[in-house]
Image (cartoon, coloured by chain):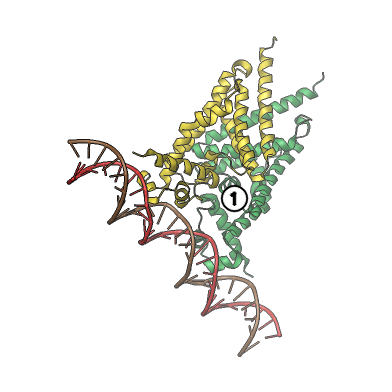
Chain colours: A green, B yellow, C brown, D red
Amino acid sequence: MNAGTRQRIVMTALELFWEKGFQSTSIADILSRTQVHSGSLYHFFPGKQDVLIAVLEAYRDGIEEWLLAPAWSGVDDPVERIFALLNGYRTQLVTTDCTYGCPIGNLALEISEPDPKIRELLAVNFANWTSAIERCLDAAGDRLPADLDRRRLAEFTLTVMEGAIMQARTYRDIESFDRNVAVLRAHFDMLMDRARQEKAPA
Amino acid sequence: MNAGTRQRIVMTALELFWEKGFQSTSIADILSRTQVHSGSLYHFFPGKQDVLIAVLEAYRDGIEEWLLAPAWSGVDDPVERIFALLNGYRTQLVTTDCTYGCPIGNLALEISEPDPKIRELLAVNFANWTSAIERCLDAAGDRLPADLDRRRLAEFTLTVMEGAIMQARTYRDIESFDRNVAVLRAHFDMLMDRARQEKAPA
DNA sequence: GAATCGCTTGATTGATCGCTCAATCAAGCG
DNA sequence: CGCTTGATTGAGCGATCAATCAAGCGATTC
């Protein structure tokens, strides 16, 4: 079986959905960029939605290799890993003049009435991202307050990242992103201050 | 001149863009809901994009009356006003089963290559929202640290709101929104704590 | 070497898209 | 009353959309 065609379709669709969104990407767009003919595409996928599903599955399965590993190479400190991940998105924004954002976030807001399977995959992608942050927070140990809800803070980090990207894209200004990350950094600093005070002798 | 037709088109488009997004809303959708015929629509608007522009102008001009006034009635404390505004979005989420979000945020991520005029209007809507928060922060006076960058915190508040809505919609779970707002509240509390310490006698 | 299989080809379908336009209508004015 | 103006009507345009399908290809199997 020639799995190359299927994979080429998925990777090309991934690119196009990121560049133009799902709805604005036509099947013809995918076909012309892959040099695949419509019959082949519909041999592997029942329809356009199923291509999107495959793309979201690729994101889900590739988070470690494509997202975390590159961002974390050479960064050991768990707290710095969190901001290194944010910096990865920053780089993407800079290299695209603040036009491309988070592919999952884009799709999450674009698809208004998502197929349950699609909504589930969007949620899984968010949840995996959040879990990666949560693991960093766990690894940060007692540098953070003992009573801190780490899952919440991980969720919050995703929230800030998505919101910051949205504004950077809208303003076409990376400094908007930087300012938001700086406030998140200040939040972390305050938490770490509090943890230090808790550990200090009374 | 019968301005009623034009306004009816704008308000209906506003509804539909909120419900289904811009791209998924067809001219035919607008026509059937307004009971207006295509010729009339194109008498007032050169094209579909111009309807979107009119909608964004309506949001821009209506922020005080539609958004701030209802959320702030009976709320005087400037800090509480900020969270009252967030609570307004929360109510919208709850009453739509977490399917509708922030109309501006949706459009900001949906339109991948926006007309400059459209991007500008999206930015203006964000900026006005941020300024409203900033005015609250200014009114909070010395309850916040003296060296606090209030504009930044206002920006950050919008960031959290948009990110929180995105996740609530994706998870179809209002508690996700609540948890994020709770972390933002904790951030405000920490800032106000610090301001109190600064004022305390050394 | 005939049959079978996964896969490819690319013309074609019918629906829907945004949009056009000639015709019609009602109101206002001199 | 004749004429102008602005709004409305609705059939219909060409383009594009996702999706279909019969025919053909090359490798494998019997």
Task: Give x and y (percent) for residue A63.
Answer: 66, 49
Q: Is residue A196 above or below residue A53?
A: above
Q: Provide the residue designation for mark 1.
A: A113
Which residue of the protein is positioned furthest toward the right in this rendering?
A201
Q: Quadrant of the C terminus of chain B?
A: top right
Q: Residue at x 61, y 51 (%)?
A: A114
Q: Indicate the quadrant where residue A105 lies.
A: top right
Local SS, label 1: loop
Q: Indicate the quadrant where residue D5 lies.
A: top left
Residue in front for this viewpoint, B141 or A183: B141
Residue in front for this viewpoint, B124 or B147: B124
Drawn side of residue B85 relative to residue D7, left or right: right
Q: Quadrant of the N terminus of chain B?
A: top left
Q: Residue at x 50, y 31 (%)?
A: B63
Number of residues whose C-alpha sits closer than 10 Å to that of mark 1, classed few (under 14), some (14–19) or many (20 or more): some
Q: Is residue A77 visible?
A: no
Q: Residue at x 50, y 58 (%)?
A: A26
Subunit that carries the residue with mark 1: A
Q: Is residue A101 above or below residue B194?
A: below
Q: Is residue A195 visible?
A: yes
Residue in front for this viewpoint, D1 or A137: D1
Drawn side of residue B29 relative to residue B88, left or right: left
Q: Is residue A104 above or below residue A197?
A: below
Task: Give x and y (percent) for residue A182.
Answer: 61, 30
Task: Give x and y (percent) for residue B93.
Answer: 62, 39
Q: Which amino acid does the dot numbered 1 rest on?
A: Glu
Drawn side of residue B116 relative to residue C4, left or right: left
Task: Give x and y (percent) for residue A8.
Answer: 58, 61
